Structures are given as structure tokens and as C-alpha cells.
Image (tube, grey):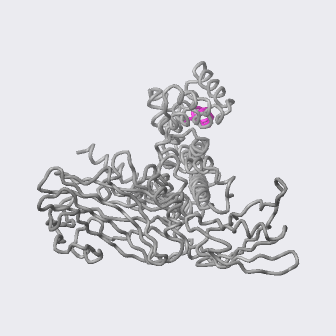
Amino acid sequence: MKTLATRKARLKFTVRRFKNVMTQISKSKRGTLGVGVIVFFVILAILAPVIAPYDPIRPRRDPEQYPAFSGQTILKIADKLCYPVWYKYLPWITRGPSERIDQFVNTLILSDGELYPKTTSFQLRDRVAEPLTVTAELPNGTVIELVQNKEWTWDIEKIRQVNIDPTLATNLPNGTVISVKYLTGFEITENIDILSDPGITSSETLNKINFLTNYSDSFNIEFNNEKGFKNDGCIAIEYSKTSSEDEEITLEIPFEYPHWSPPKSFVTHFSARLEADTSNARVIATVYIENKNTNKTYLISSIADNPIKPSPQFLHYSEVSTSNETTTNVGSLYPEQVIFPLPSNVSFIVKLKFQNVNQSATLYLDNLQCLLYGNSFGLLGTDNGSPYPPRDIFSTLVHGTRVSLIVGVLSALFSTIIGLFLGLISGYMGGFVDEIIMRFADLLLVLPTLPLFIVLIAVMKSTYGLVNIWNIIILITFFGWMSFSRSVRSMVLSIRERPFIEAAKAAGGGKFYIITRHIIPNVFPLVYVTLATSVPGAIITEASLSWLGLGDPSVPSWGKILYDFNVSGIAVTKGLTEYWFWIFPPCVAIALLATAFILLGFALDEILNPKLRERR
């Protein structure tokens, strides 16, 4: 009971002392600011999975919702190099349609005694949403408006190219200025899921789909709430054969594309399971996107080589806009720009042709979706997606708070403990022990730390193939204790000569007792200050190593964000101003957190240092 009472008394004393310290810190503006910033980052680190739910290294869309993208195949959350979603509210960001005029000089060259135009295809600076006029200004000042589809043509599949009739170009005088006036546009766009319920969990979803067929007596469409991919609902297409030919049904999902900027890419997806009365029955699915405004239908993919066959399990089908099949079918390397050149009414179409069915079959459709990826995402946009899918910069920044706090606090804690222990031993023992410890500390102090870290980590990488965050903590700890140990030693040299130490020795106190009961309590104010002021150095060191590509690639950190930006080449190709939201936030976060610990250290020094302590 006495021991328990003593422990309670000590706990009360510790709590009371902590409250007193916090009260003193609250009286310091620098201390209050520092504690406030640190608390903010601590909360951010604790709530990171809630605030930023995307994986900071390999983000992906829900694989249960899009099972064609499972395992190593990842469905990206957004496209690369997206702007923040709030960019659309900035006044200097252009919005909507705008007219452009590009001018070219008709140049004739002499070949085999004949004049030929140097080129009849003119590459425009911007994407063409709609061509307007093409004029030719002769050297004498006469302006002639050329006739579309006769004297000039524009192919929507070659969105930046206007072609002049070769005969016309030959007959135009040398030096004629050809002006192309066209409509283009730009908007900040977000991702569009054309179906809000791709899992078909409600019968209401069927109302958004048009079912078209010339064989209405052969098909019956129902909502089935049991046989979906996750047993939570699907479309059941019941087929009864009524003719000798292959019969088909079309699913059409109309939607509006309201933007003047085309999507950066798109993905189609559906899951299907066939129940049929013959084992060789099959369904051929063909996916299209139709632009109602231009009256053009674009083939996206056909699964003739991989048809839907009778199976107890769902089969999953998907296609991305960057695939060879899609680009070949559309006839452009950028099919999204061809299909969505301007605001349009569009339909996502899936045609289903039933083959080799004797009497009846039932096709279950689930996870039906067409995803359009916009040019903005999240609070800080996305990176360039190399080598992993594009990452949400905000998620990486938030999760990186954990890494910086862990590295900073643990490195400072471990190096302070080592420095305290060696400083106490060196100062109190003196003699040969003191000489060995201090000379070793001097040796480490004169070594160039950052170059040495680079060499050691490079050796670790070549030896073990990977450097993890704990290796970095150990390195920072090993090279961070020397200065503190010298400070502790100097204090111990002073304290051990004081009368109360002599009295303790006379009373029979051993070395361990004197160090733990008399010297450490007098040294501990320096420990608090050193802990606070050592954290910034560890944070900056880890960020520097990660920025140089020497950090743990599997761990998100602020330095890794800077490294990804550095290797992306964006600074060279597009400059810092366009993608500043990628590099500035981690720099600001590093500076804020480091400054907060420094301010806290100053406040603790004012409280615990008798020379600086406020007099009352």
C-alpha cells in the first residue's frame, strides 16, 4: 500500500509538473505557436487514413467494383498531372470556348522544273474542337475564303491538322499567307462516372439504361437481386430463341458531356455470366461510344476472340482508351479527343449478340461502367504516375506527415538517449574512459555527414537491394549524438564538483546512485531542449536523402514527393509555375514542422534555463 501511494504521489507530481510546463509555454507566443503547429501535424498523421483514404504509393479504384482490374492490374484513381479541383475557381484560368487563328506561308519549291508546294498539311497549335474558316491572303493583299471539303479539309481523327488541296496550293502565289480560324476550348474537368451505381444494386439503375432490339419477343429484361458479382444485384437478360439467325440486344446509356476540354482518358468495364442450354453457346459483346452531335459511332472494343461463354463465375471485360485496340478502332492516338471534341450528347453502348443457343439462355450483367478521367483531381492534383499509377499528391502529403514525425522524433529521442548516456559516463568517470568517448565523438563530428550518408546508403542499396526507413533512423541516430554528449559532459564536470555530490559520496552513495539520483535530474532540462531542437535536423536530413533518391521507395514522405517531381522533368519541360502545387506543399510542410520544433525548443530553453527564466 505504501508503494502504491508513493506511485500515485509521483504520478500526481509528474502531472502537476507537466501542467506547469505547459502553462509556462502558453505564456510564450513562440511556444504556443510551435505547440499548435506540432499538434496540427500530429492530428494530421493520426487521421491520415480518414483524411486521405487513397494509398499514397499505389492508389487504385475499388477492385471489387471493377474486378477486371485486380491483382497486379490497377485501375487508376485519376489521370496523370491533374490540377487541383479548386483550380476552376481561379480568375486567370481560361474557361469555355475560344477562337484561335494560326497563320502559315505557302512556300513553293522547284523540283524537276516544276513548282510544288512545300507542304499541304498545316499543324495547328491547339486542339481543334471545330474548324471555322480558312482564308488565303495573296501577296497583293487580296483575301480569298477557301471552301471546306473542296479546297481544304479537316479530319476529326487528326485534330490538329488542316489539309489544303495540292492543286490549289500549287496555283497560289509563293508567299501567300494561309490563315486557319478554329474553335478550341479549355476547362477544369473532374472525373465522370456515367453510372452512379455500376454494381446494379438497385432496380432504379435499369431506368437509366435503354434496351434496344429488333427481337422484342426474344428478350426479357429484369433486375435480379441475388445473382450479381457480389450477390447484391445485376441485370438479368432472359433470351428465348425465336428465329434462326443470331439475335442481338443493345444497351444504351445516354449522358451529357458538358465540357470544352476532352477527358484525358477513359475506361470501359462490365462483368458478365452466361447460363445457357448448350455448352457451346456464347455471347459476342461489342462496346461503342456514340457522339450524338457529330452523328458518329466509335468502336471501342469487341470480344469476338474472347466471347462470353457459359460459366459458374462472372467473366470480366475492360478496355482503356490508350490500348492498341481502341486507338486502332478510333483511328487516333488520342481517341478521347476525337470522341469528345466539344460539349455533346453521348451514349455508351454495349451490343450483345447471342449465338449457338438452342432454346433459351440468361445473361447476367454487372459492374457496368464507363469512366471519363478529367484534368483535375483532389486538393493538390496528381503526379506524373511513374512508375506507379498517378498518385493523389494530397494523400502522399498527409501520409508523409507520419514518416517525418516518426523519423524526426525517434531519431532525436535515440540520439539524445545515446548522447545523455555517453556524456554522463564520460563526464563522471573521467580519465581513460572520458578520453576514448570524446575522441570518438570528435572523429564523428569532423566527418561530412550528408556525403557520408549518401555513400553508406548507396552501399546498403547495392548490398541488400533496399533501404528502409529504419536504416535511415539508425544512421541519423548514430551521427546525431556527439554534440549533445559534449554538452552533457561539460555540465557533469561542473556538477560532480558541487558539495551535494561530495555529501552523497560521504554518505556511501555509489556511482550509479549518484548519477541517477543527483546528476541526471540536474541535466534533464538540457534533455528537453535538445529533444525539441534535434527533431528539425532529422526531418530535413530524411527529406534530403529522399529528395536525392536514397530514401525508402515504398514509404511516402515529403522528400519523396520532391524526388518524384525532380525526376519527372516537369521543371524543365513546363517550368515550376504550372505545377507549383506539386512541389510547394511539401516544402512548406517541412519548413513549418521544423520551425515549430525550433520554436518549442526556444520556449523550453526560456523556461528551464535559469539565465533566461522569467524572474518573479
Q: Where does residue 254 sit, x and y in percent of width and height? A: 37, 75
The magenta segment: 485-499
Q: How would you classify the magenta stretch by its main secondary structure?
A: helix
The residue at 46%/53% (across/down) is 323
Q: Is residue 515 above or below residue 553?
A: above
Question: Is the C terminus in the top left, top right, bottom left or bottom right quadrant?
Answer: bottom right
The number of numbered discs placed on residues in the rendered structure image is 0
Side of 496 where 295 appears, left or right: left
- Of residues 394 and 597, the one drawn nearer to the viewer in this rendering: 394
The residue at 54%/71% (across/down) is 341
Q: Is residue 401 above or below residue 131?
A: above
- Of residues 411 and 520, the one drawn nearer to the viewer in this rendering: 411
Q: Is residue 488 magenta?
A: yes
- Asked whether residue 438 is in view, the answer is yes
Side of 307 where 410 appears, left or right: right
The residue at 52%/67% (across/down) is 338
- Of residues 497 and 340, the one drawn nearer to the viewer in this rendering: 340
- Asked whether residue 24 is in view, the answer is no
Question: Is the N terminus in the top left, top right, bottom left or bottom right quadrant?
Answer: top left
Side of 491 where 237 appears, left or right: left
Q: Is residue 128 magenta?
A: no
**Hey, which residue is sitting farthest top in the picture?**
432
> For residue 577, what is the image quadrant?
bottom right
Q: Where does residue 58 sit, x and y in percent of width and height? A: 43, 49
The residue at 40%/55% (across/down) is 75
Q: Where does residue 545 sit, x and y in percent of width and height? A: 59, 41
- Of residues 353 and 597, the one drawn nearer to the viewer in this rendering: 353
